[in-house]
Image (cartoon, grey):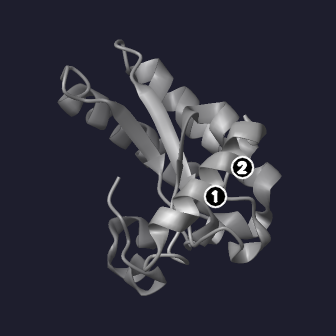
């Protein structure tokens, strides 16, 4: 799916005529359009052996829908995952991410519930961009005990 590049871009998208950004995930009409879009994406690119993973949502905790909390968002993410699974005969892996860093928005960047849904974890952090070698080493050590 295409990144919005910031909340101000919502008004430039076709979906903005259907619902607000906050209501986009639950709005009945937008759900029907997204289902068609997901089906198209799978038909267009899903056959490719070069496709490794479907990235269902990038930096979820930076979206309007995250305002409803982790539990509500996980329910929505499961719905998107189910859609991709139903359209994908090759059963590609799926992923989703949170972003912003280890302490952003009071959310756990490891997002255990989200990763339990998608199966492939990724984490975006910008806090230590100038010293990532040290931070990665420390976080890997923590993750070994987390898994």
Percent of width and height locating residue 70: 77, 56
Residue 140 visible in the displayed image: yes
Q: State yes or no: discs 1 and 2 in contact (Cβ < 8 Å).
A: yes
Q: How many marks?
A: 2
Residue 25 visible in the displayed image: no
In the image shown, does 143 or 28 lie closer to the viewer? 143
Which quadrant is home to the C terminus?
top right
Q: Residue at x 65, y 33 (%)?
A: 117
In the image shown, does 106 or 5 lie closer to the viewer? 106
Percent of width and height locating residue 101: 60, 70
Q: Residue at x 79, y 62 (%)?
A: 69
In the image shown, does 96 or 147 lie closer to the viewer? 147
Percent of width and height locating residue 102: 67, 67
Q: Residue at x 81, y 50 (%)?
A: 71
The secondary element bearing badge 1 is classed as: helix
Residue bearing the label numbered 1: 138
The secondary element bearing badge 2 is classed as: helix
Query: Does residue 35 lie above or below 63 as drawn?
Result: above
Q: Residue furthest top?
A: 89
Q: Residue at x 37, y 33 (%)?
A: 53
Q: Answer few, some or many: residues within 10 Å of disc 1's Cα (few below 14, many 20 plus, some between 14 and 19).
A: few
Residue bearing the label numbered 2: 142
Q: Residue furthest bottom?
A: 8
Q: Which mark is residue 46?
A: none
Residue 60: quarter of image: bottom right
Percent of width and height locating residue 142: 72, 49
In the image shown, does 83 or 27 lie closer to the viewer? 83
């Amino acid at each position: 799916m295409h990144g919005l590049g910031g909340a101000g871009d919502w008004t430039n998208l076709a979906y903005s005529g259907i619902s607000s950004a906050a209501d986009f995930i639950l709005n009945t009409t937008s759900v029907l359009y997204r289902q068609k879009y997901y089906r198209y994406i799978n038909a267009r690119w899903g056959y490719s052996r070069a496709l490794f993973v479907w990235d269902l949502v990038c930096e979820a905790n930076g979206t309007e829908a995250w305002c409803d909390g982790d539990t509500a968002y996980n329910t929505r993410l499961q719905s998107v995952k189910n859609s991709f699974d139903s359209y994908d005969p090759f059963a590609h892996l799926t992923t989703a991410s949170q972003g912003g860093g280890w302490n952003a928005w009071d959310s756990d960047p490891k997002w255990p519930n989200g990763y339990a849904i998608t199966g492939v974890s990724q984490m975006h952090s910008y806090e230590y961009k100038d010293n990532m070698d040290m931070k990665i080493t420390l976080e890997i050590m923590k993750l070994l005990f987390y898994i």
